[in-house]
């Protein structure tokens, strides 16, 4: 994918990057509101913000993503986690929880 990229230069974020076709900057509050963000690759997962909106605060703190989806991993794409609440800390560091459906040994959807 091509387009405008946001790339973090924060030393603890390992050059975290994502595409954002548009953004609003509030220089007084030091807030960047990115819109239409399709996904953010973090570690071996792809995080899809629910509304496509990602808010970045002072010191590169990313607002908690709510009702997002996660696809893991980005190669095999075996696992989809829905209704995710995620905190992204860096390119290889995030904490999230959500709902995961799977088939049990009797092929029942759990």
Image (cartoon, rainbow, N blue to C red):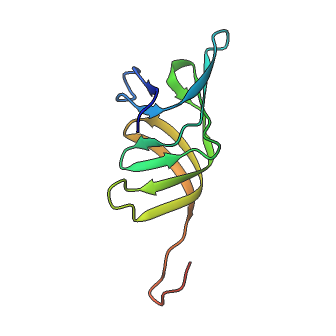
Residue at (49, 43) in percent of width and height? 39
* Residue at far left of view: 75
Percent from the top left, x then y, of residue 80?
49, 62
User: In the displayed structure, would residue 75 be above or below residue 32?
Assistant: below
> Does 84 appear above or below 100?
above
Q: Is residue 31 above or below residue 97?
A: above
Q: Residue at 36%, 22% (x, y): give it.
A: 11
Give the tally of numbered discs: 0
Asked whether residue 70 appears in the rendered view, the answer is yes
Query: Toward which corner of the image does residue 78 lie, by quadrant?
Result: bottom left
Q: Nearer the viewer, residue 47 or 19?
A: 19
> Within the image, what quadrant is residue 5 found in?
top left
Q: Residue at x 34, y 29 (%)?
A: 14
Residue depicted at x 53% and y 85%: 108
Q: Is residue 99 above or below residue 38?
A: below
Q: Residue furthest top?
A: 28
The quarter in which the C terminus is drawn is bottom right
Please tell me in which quadrant of the rendered image residue 1 appears: top left
Q: Nearer the viewer, residue 29 or 39?
A: 39
Outermost residue, bottom direction? 106
Quick check: can you spot residue 32?
no
The picture places residue 97, in percent across and down from the top left corner, at: 55, 54
Q: Position of residue 107 (x, y in %)?
A: 48, 87
């Amino acid at each position: 994918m091509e387009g405008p990229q946001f790339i973090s230069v924060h030393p603890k974020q390992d050059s975290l990057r994502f595409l954002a076709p548009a953004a609003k900057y509030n220089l007084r509050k030091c807030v960047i509101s990115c819109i239409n963000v399709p996904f953010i690759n973090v570690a071996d997962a792809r995080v899809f913000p629910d509304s496509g909106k990602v808010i970045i605060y002072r010191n590169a703190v990313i607002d908690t993503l709510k009702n997002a989806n996660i696809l893991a991993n980005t190669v095999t794409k075996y696992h989809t986690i829905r209704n995710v609440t995620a905190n992204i800390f860096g390119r290889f560091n995030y904490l999230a929880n959500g709902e995961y459906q799977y088939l049990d040994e009797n092929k029942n959807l759990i």
